[in-house]
Image: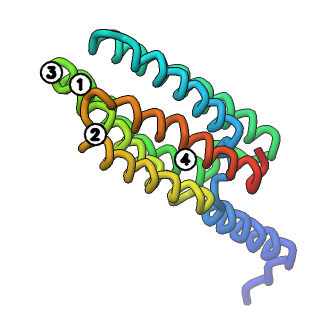
Amino acid sequence: MARPHPIQDHAIDNLRYIRNTMERAASLTAVPGYGGMVMGGTALLAAVIASRVSTNREWLTVWLTELVLAVAIGSLAMVFKARQTGASLWSESGRKFLLSFTPAAAVGALLTAPLYLHGQANLLGAVWLLCYGAAVIAGGAFSVKIVPAMGAAFLALGVVALVTPATLRDVPLAAGFGGLHLIFGYWIARKYGG
């Protein structure tokens, strides 16, 4: 006859199962609202500077500098918010967010050089907005509900950018990377704690 297992063994196994299930189902809440707002502010500044340069090379330099700055701000803000809220960026939902966000963002980065080198710099804003929107929607599936909505807004601006004259190419970029980050950043900060 088999010996019964002590009840605490079953309880510990059940608690472990419940904890793992909850972690898998949890949303990433470390998306930084205030960090998004700072990113929006630097993007508006970049749009003003980029609209005043005279060559595509200078224009691209301004926006690539903004990209590096935005990635640094966003990353630091996520780490700070995660520490503040006690969330882990490396939880299952955090890893899923990153793995879902990265492919579309990487496509935007990879298309930059060929489009620029083939004289298609006027398409870069649309490509960046569309790829970023797709990345945010994909990653947002593992975050709070407002994040995929932000991604959809970026996609819409990407479509607008496709038909925007080259002389106004910074307007959709300012509206997206500037305005949308400010608006949604404020909403996230207010509703989801910073």
Query: Camera-side residue: 28 or 145?
Result: 145
Which residue in the protein does label 3 denote?
A: 119
**In front: mark 1 or mark 2?**
2
Q: Amino acid at mark 3?
A: Gly
**In front: mark 2 or mark 4?**
2
Q: Cα distance, mark 3 to mark 2?
A: 17 Å
Local secondary structure at mark 2: loop
Which residue in the protein does label 4 denote?
A: 95
Q: Position of residue 72 (x, y in %)?
A: 58, 24
Q: Earlier in the sequence, mark 4 or mark 1?
A: 4
Badge 2, how many Cα within 10 Å: few under 14, some, many 20+?
A: some
- Kindly indicate whether the residue at mark 4 contacts the one at mark 3 (C-beta within 8 angstroms): no
Query: Camera-side residue: 35 or 89?
Result: 35
Q: Cα distance, mark 3 to mark 4?
A: 37 Å
Q: Earlier in the sequence, mark 3 or mark 4?
A: 4
- Kindly indicate whether the residue at mark 3 contacts the one at mark 1 (C-beta within 8 angstroms): yes
Question: Is residue 90 at all visible to an observer of this figure?
Answer: no
Residue ID at (24%, 21%)? 113
Name the side, left or right, on which 14 lies relative to 132.
right
Q: Cα distance, mark 1 to mark 3?
A: 6 Å
Which residue in the protein does label 1 denote?
A: 121
Question: Is residue 91 at all visible to an observer of this figure?
Answer: yes
Name the side, left or right, on which 27 lies relative to 176.
right
* Residue reaching furthest to the left: 118
Residue ID at (67%, 41%)? 32
Q: Earlier in the sequence, mark 3 or mark 2?
A: 3
